[in-house]
């Protein structure tokens, strides 16, 4: 995609364990434009967070990028040194982590954590950084921002901590915002406010947002395009309307069918049989075949390609037209 802000090509990340070296994600291809929200959706263990951590170069010591490119503004982030990647992290690319209560440092005030990020990248005085931090706290809807500036994370609710994290992520006007399950563990009303805030910020700053979630309600609310991930691979990618109206991969159909209906409360909920395989026991062929009711010998023996079946609609399956 020529006008892409972010273009991930053939990204594979492996982990070195006591049992050997195993791929956590394999041949991931994603692209994102400015002003667009791309949601990466899938069950826990699908590789969503590892994809974001690979992008930010924040993998644990046992993990490393084995192959692929992460092109951001014509720069391949994979080839950068730690010092060079630090110029992008927190400035051009920011991240909202999954659990704000643990992502924020408990021994520093919220304000000092925001001003640190500002001073590292903006090279401004402490007073100017404080004014900027208070402005950001107000911008993300925090009441009495001067008071919250001096508060510690444990003195705030989960929703307030999440807003502090968003303020920190926006402190240097990033072009790309990565949000990893930004509404996990928040109540429904706070979740709605956070999502509205992210949409407002995206339009105001014309940012690209890579949103990682397992919640299809969040996908419907936020996404322009959606990439469905399973066992470390993208299995379907399309625009949000097509995904809900005409999903093609059996896994995508299963996820949508698993959403509880608004009516018929006594109806038994659908669930996809089995679970996501661990990285040390990936099946041969199509990785979804042990859980797929339409699997054939071909699915067991040969891995399908991610193919474009219509414009901007890609599916990785041998039996694209099967129902669920």
Image: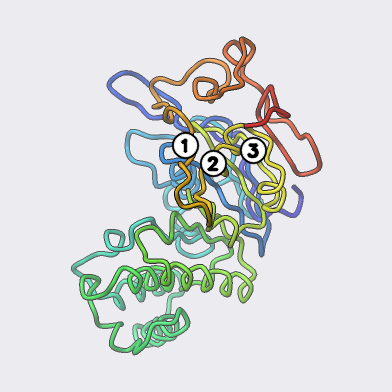
* Residue 318 on image: x %, y %: 68, 22
- In the picture as drawn, the residue positioned furthest to the left comes out as 107
Discs 1/3, front: 1
Is 174 in front, or is 266? 266
Q: Depth check: 246 or 3 in front?
A: 246
Question: Where residue 236 is drawn, which disc sits there?
Answer: 3
| Mark 2 nearby-residue class (10 Å; few <14, some 14–19, many ≥20) | some
Give residue 117's quadrant in the image.
bottom left
Q: Which residue is mark 2?
A: 255
Q: Where in the figure is residue 155, as x and y percent of width and height?
A: 21, 75
Q: Is residue 89 left or right of residue 293?
A: left
Residue 271 tag number:
1
Q: CA distance from mark 2 to mark 1?
A: 8 Å
In the rendered structure, the answer to whether residue 285 lies left or right of residue 319 reads left
* Mark 3 or mark 2, whichever is nearer to me: 2
301, above or below 91, in the image: above
Say whether disc 2 or disc 1 marks the residue closer to the N-terminus: 2
Q: Which mark is residue 250?
A: none
Q: Mark 1 or mark 3: name the one nearer the start of the chain.
A: 3
> Do tag 2 and tag 1 residues touch (Cβ < 8 Å)?
no
Residue 161 higher or lower than 282, as above or below: below
> Which of disc 2 and disc 3 is earlier in sequence?
3
> Disc 3 to disc 2, how far (Cα)?
12 Å
Location of the C terminus by quadrant is: top right
For marks 2 and 1, give the one nearer the viewer. Answer: 1
Q: Which element is circle 2 on?
A: helix
Whole-percent x and y of residue 181? Answer: 44, 55
Callout 1 secondary element: loop
Q: Residue 249 in the image: x percent, y percent?
A: 64, 33
Instruction: Kindly report the distance in space between the C-alpha atoms of the residues bearing marks 1 and 3.
Output: 19 Å
Q: For mark 3, does the 10 Å Cα neighbourhood hold few (<14), some (14 to 19), or many (20 or more) residues?
A: many
Which residue appears at 21% of the width and 70% of the height?
A: 154
């Amino acid at each position: 995609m020529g006008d892409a802000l972010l273009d991930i090509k053939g990204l594979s990340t492996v982990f070195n364990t006591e049992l050997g070296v195993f791929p956590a994600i394999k041949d991931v291809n994603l692209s994102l434009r400015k002003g667009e929200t791309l949601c990466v959706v899938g069950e826990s263990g699908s590789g969503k967070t590892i994809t974001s951590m690979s992008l930010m170069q924040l993998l644990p010591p046992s993990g490393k990028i084995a192959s692929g490119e992460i092109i951001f503004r014509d720069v391949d982030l994979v080839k950068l040194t730690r010092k060079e990647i630090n110029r992008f992290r927190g400035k051009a690319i920011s991240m909202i982590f999954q659990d704000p209560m643990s992502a924020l440092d408990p021994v520093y005030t919220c304000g000092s954590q925001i001003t640190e990020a500002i001073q590292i990248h903006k090279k401004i005085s402490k007073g100017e950084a404080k004014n900027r931090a208070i402005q950001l706290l107000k911008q993300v809807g925090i009441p009495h921002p001067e008071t919250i500036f001096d508060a510690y994370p444990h003195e705030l609710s989960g929703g307030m901590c999440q807003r502090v994290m968003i303020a920190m992520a926006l402190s240097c006007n990033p072009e790309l915002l990565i949000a990893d399950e930004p509404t996990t563990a928040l109540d429904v009303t706070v979740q709605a406010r956070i999502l509205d805030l992210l949409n407002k910020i995206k339009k105001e700053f014309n940012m690209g947002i890579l949103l990682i979630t397992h919640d299809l309600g969040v996908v419907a609310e936020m996404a322009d395009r959606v990439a469905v991930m399973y066992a470390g691979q993208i299995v379907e990618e399309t625009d949000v309307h097509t995904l809900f109206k005409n999903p093609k991969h059996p896994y995508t159909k299963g996820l949508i069918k698993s959403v509880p209906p608004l009516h018929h409360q006594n109806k038994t909920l659908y669930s996809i049989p089995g679970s996501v395989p661990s990285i040390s026991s990936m099946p041969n062929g199509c990785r979804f075949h042990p859980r797929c009711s339409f699997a054939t010998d071909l699915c067991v023996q040969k891995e399908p390609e991610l193919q474009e079946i219509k414009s901007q609609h890609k599916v990785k399956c041998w039996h694209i037209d099967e129902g669920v």
